[in-house]
Amino acid sequence: MGVKGFVEGGIASIIAGCSTHPLDLIKVRMQLQGETPISSTPSSSPLRPALAFHPANHATQAHVPITPRAVPRVGPVTVGVRIVTQEGVAALFSGISATVLRQTLYSTTRMGLYDMLKQKWTDPKTNNMPLGRKIIAGLIAGGIGAAVGNSADVAMVRMQADGRLPAAQRRNYKSVVDAITQMSKNEGITSLWRGSSLTVNRAMLVTASQLASYDQFKEMILEKGLMKDGLGTHVTASFAAGFVAAVVTNPVDVIKTRVMNMKVEPGNAPPYNGAIDCAMKTIKAEGPMALYKGFIPTISRQGPFTIVLFVTLEQVRKLLKDF
């Protein structure tokens, strides 16, 4: 029974991840909007323009940018259209090999562990599991799954973000295997676990809010007789779970994306010294609502992802019920 939960969850997660990959890519691009460009020269840093010293030459001063916010923020549709027009339709699936590996490692682990804990902690008399236990099971399963799949997560973020960089600065990973190989070779094996604390925290929140709320919403719908146990119930409960997960995890997701995507040049200090430093710099430069950048594509992706995930999971369970 334990192995069966992993197989069912893995199949559903891979299908859901691949079908919503373009929305996830748009979300990553939006989360990186407004990020401070990295430069090796201190005087060009836009974080503290008032401290930069410029020669007393009016002609030169005329070309000094007044504000670092030169690039306007755009919405998900504009970002998607821009990706297609500038990089081609295939660019919407950049990093999909990393998505497959991530879902295979991370989601298979978290779904399987949650299913095991759910079976163990469900009251045999009422056949129900208290919400508190569902949340704890989600936190445990999500944390372990994230630790297992962090390397694929880093590769996925980088491959999705690569197209926004100038051609000379792109990493140009050919596949998730190439990405992991190059990261290990050029940045050390520890780079595969960059942002792992954020990944674990986010995964714990996602799993606890997504899986626990799905089960809770589904039970409420069935108990109150609003709908029968079928496609309508699965879609309604999964969309509600996706919305809850998006609201809870978006700030952590923004910070995770930026930390994983940062480029650490030899001899220079990293752009961010950790999650808290990244959060403080982001809020200082772009305001508190920057932590909810990409929320529309996040909910646009979380909704369909969660619906496909749980609808597929229910169908796979029916197919494998005799095994």
Image (spheres, grey):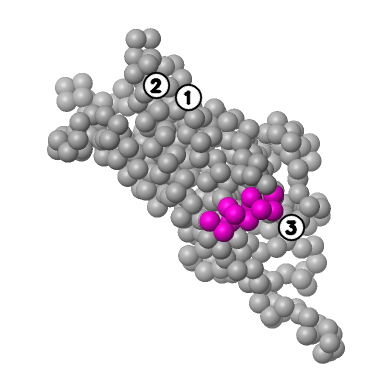
State the residue at coordinates (30%, 31%).
231
Identify residue for label 1. Answer: 11
Q: Residue 54's quadrant in the figure?
A: bottom right
Rendered image: mark on residue 178: none
Task: Choose top left, top right, bottom left or bottom right for residue 115.
Answer: top left
User: Which residue is under mark 2?
Assistant: 316
Q: Earlier in the sequence, mark 2 or mark 1?
A: 1
Q: Residues within 10 Å of mark 2 (few under 14, many from 20)?
A: some
Q: Which residues are magenta?
A: 77-87
Residue drawn at 56 percent across, 63 percent down = 74
> Could you tell me the amino acid type at mark 2?
Val
Q: Which residue is mark 3?
A: 269
Question: CB atoms at circles 2 and 1 under 8 Å apart?
Answer: yes
Q: Secondary structure at mark 2?
A: helix
Tell me if I can see residue 131 in this picture: no
Q: Quadrant of the N terminus?
A: top left
Q: Are marks 1 and 3 in contact (CB under 8 Å)?
A: no
Is 79 included in the stretch rendered in magenta?
A: yes
Q: Nearer the viewer, mark 1 or mark 3?
A: 1
Label 3 – label 2 distance at C-alpha: 48 Å
Q: Residue at x 61, y 64 (%)?
A: 34
Q: Residue 5 at what x, y percent from top left? A: 41, 21
Q: Residues within 10 Å of mark 3 (few under 14, many from 20)?
A: few
Q: Position of residue 41 (x, y in %)?
A: 80, 67
